[in-house]
Image (cartoon, grey):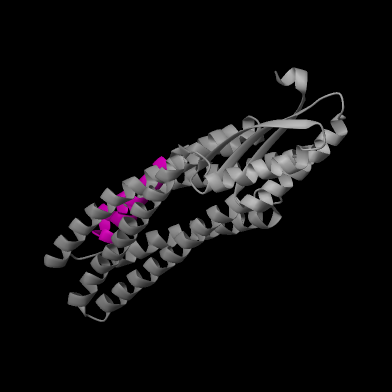
Amino acid sequence: MDESSELAIRRELAEWYRVERISMWTLLPVTAAFFVAAQQTGSVTVLALALMFTVRSAAGFFQLYALLRAFRQNAFSFPYGAGKFLDFGSFLCGALDVPAGLIVVYVAVIRLIHPYDVGYVEATVVVGLLLLRTIVLQVWHRRLVVSSRELVGPLKADYRKRRNLTLSTLVVVVVLGIGLALEEEGILSLGERVDDVMALLVAAWLLWGGARAAMRHFGALVDRPLPKEERAIVDRILGEQTGTSGLFGTVATRKSGVESFIDIDLRFGDECSLAEAERVGDRIRAELEVALGETHVRLFVVPAEDAA
């Protein structure tokens, strides 16, 4: 990785951290407001969203810490050290979504059996303000994705989460509006249950998405050896590129989730110049990234006597 790429990563990490920090600090008062609104309006849907935001707040601190660590330290270490915090934050979010979903199911079923007058006007206004916040953050994040040069992949993944939240919040606003319209038309028996049905849908999303995220990101927390076929590709490429050049290398590999991590110390002696060794290293890195897909390659070119 050249100096310009590293500087670009640092700039993009700084902007990403700025977006996440503002998102985090605006989420805390939103969460508090939703708990108050749930108490005042009697809306189980608003309660479901308040529980969801509580979980997101806990996970969000890990993401903030990961981005801050990546920005303040060496950008190269991001997939190794700080990336674990991102995975743990996502695992924690998924694991806590499940009990939150079960709580919402319990309350919504009780309300279906014993209907409760819901303050649809206040509930719709509160969720509408949330929708405005999510749209502003989504547009900001989209601009960051478009301008990104080095972190397009992780930024796009994070942007998809924001887009899904915006769409789901829009659905909630529409459904609450339908409940309000039904009550205005005097169809109280149906209007009172719209909120409970919407809450059950949110709970189903929390249960399904939470279990799926917890299982996926737990796998990324546990490092595994690189599969034999992938390690064979690494050895083949390294052998082809260093066989006749007077170079030799040592390799350390691991697999975390769907991503592979490869560290190579490429050593050169008197018969090979530093410039030639660096050209060979660039070819090795490029071939590995093409052959193995989602792979992080760190390659160090060092004199043979220093590597010892």
x, y (%) of residue 271?
87, 27
In screen coordinates, is 109 left or right of 159?
left
x, y (%) of residue 186?
22, 80
x, y (%) of residue 69?
57, 32
Residue 301 visible in the current orientation: yes
Establish if 135 lies above or below 247.
below
Can you say which quadrant of the picture contains the N terminus? top right
Task: State the residue at coordinates (45%, 59%).
Answer: 165
x, y (%) of residue 147?
70, 54
Q: Where are the magenta residues, as a range?
A: 35-59
In screen coordinates, is 304 left or right of 182?
right
Establish if 277 lies above or below 258.
above
Is residue 53 on the magenta stretch? yes
Establish if 259 lies above or below 274.
below
- Residue extending farthest to the front is 244
Of residues 115 and 72, which is closer to you in this image? 72
Question: Which SS does the magenta portion mostly show?
Answer: helix
Quarter of image, res 113: bottom left
Is residue 135 on the magenta stretch? no
In screen coordinates, is 141 left or right of 27?
right
Establish if 263 lies above or below 158.
above
Of residues 254 and 9, which is closer to you in this image? 254
Task: State the residue at coordinates (16%, 67%).
Answer: 112
Can you say which quadrant of the picture contains the C terminus? top right
